[in-house]
Amino acid sequence: MDAISYERAGDVAGAVRAAQQPGAVFIGGGTNLLDLMKGGVSRPMRLIDITHIGGLDTVATLPDGGLRIGALVRNSDAANHALVREQYPLLSQAFLSGASAQLRNMATVGGNLLQRTRCGYFYDTAFTQCNKRQPGSGCAALDGHNRTHAILGASPQCIAVNPSDMSVALAALDAVVRVSGPAGERTIPFAEFHRLPGDRPDVDTSLQAGELITAVDLPPPRFAANAHYLKVRDRASYAFALISVAAALQMDGARVQSARIALGGVAHKPWRASVAEQMLAGQTLTQDTLRQAAAAALSDARPQHDNRFKVQLAQRAIVRAVNMAAQSAGRNGGVA
Ligand code: SF4
């Protein structure tokens, strides 16, 4: 049995200081970390409990009209917060499609950002080949069961996908992650927060050692009226996405002024479908235009032997999600 020390941080500076100790990790809701520890995937020496730090559990409007969601806000509280529901219904829908009610009540926004992949070979230490768990050991998923794995942005080192629903919506909404660390505070654009695996699949994010996530900032709401989060999964709840699509539109009648589309379940990070967004911008939304944009979004797909179905599924999910977003005006209860 490994000995683990426990320390309760009183403020951000104290947490960052405590994290400088060898083998230290932050613990918030613990919904992923405790699973990893129980399975022997993660073996921290020190747990720095950040749940008693004041000021990180609030949701507040920013001077520019955007929204700051503290890193310790529980997923269920964020999903049901009036400002999130009214101004960012895409994010509320994504929160509510993740995990179970019990897990959403415990999991924090900051922890959700740091969820590790659900690749079965990563979690099962009986498999010795996993570059994410043990760099240089290989990847059992390449020749194994890879139905749920990546079709975009993977590398020969790792074909895992990011499991977070929340992060797909945050990617579409151009969120910014606020962190505090030994070198001070900084912000990370969402597109740069999660990494593709490359030759370092053991590194999931661009966080530096000892940096603590303090909040997520959302830009002023532009997509409240026309937004939809679609999650396609093997069962109706408590399942990770085979494919998910966060679609947000600014509409002028039937014409798309601008579009934001992000995909989940396809890559090591939430995947922005930028080409599809550009193809839709300025166009009247026809099914032909939409199908062409969806096909372009998957033109670089490189499926594995078990998940070729994901390419067409992702295209169809984009078409459906964008159609739902276009038709959602008034249903979301959002404001433009
Ligand atoms: Fe490990 Fe990534 Fe391969 Fe899964 S896909 S076995 S996480 S290296």
Image (cartoon, rainbow, N blue to C red):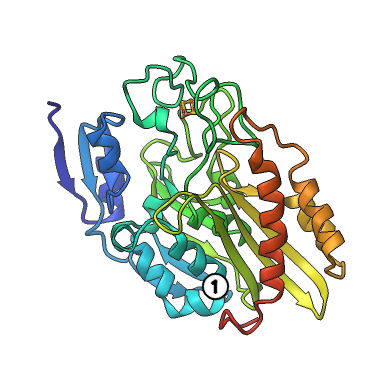
Residue 243 on image: x %, y %: 58, 49
Q: Is residue 162 left or right of residue 293?
A: left
Residue 92 on image: x %, y %: 49, 69
* Residue 285 sits in quarter: bottom right
State whether label 1 is within 8 Å of ligand 1: no
Q: Quadrant of the N terminus?
A: top left
* Residue 291 sits in quarter: bottom right
Reply above or below: 198 against 57. above
Residue 86 seen in render: yes
Q: Quadrant of the C terminus?
A: bottom right
* Residue 128 sits in quarter: top left
Residue 310 on image: x %, y %: 64, 42
Depth check: 113 or 251 in front?
251
Q: Is residue 77 left or right of residue 6?
A: right
Circle 1 SS class: helix
Depth check: 298 or 309 in front?
309
**Amino acid type, label 1:** Pro
Residue 213 seen in render: no
Identify residue for label 1: 89
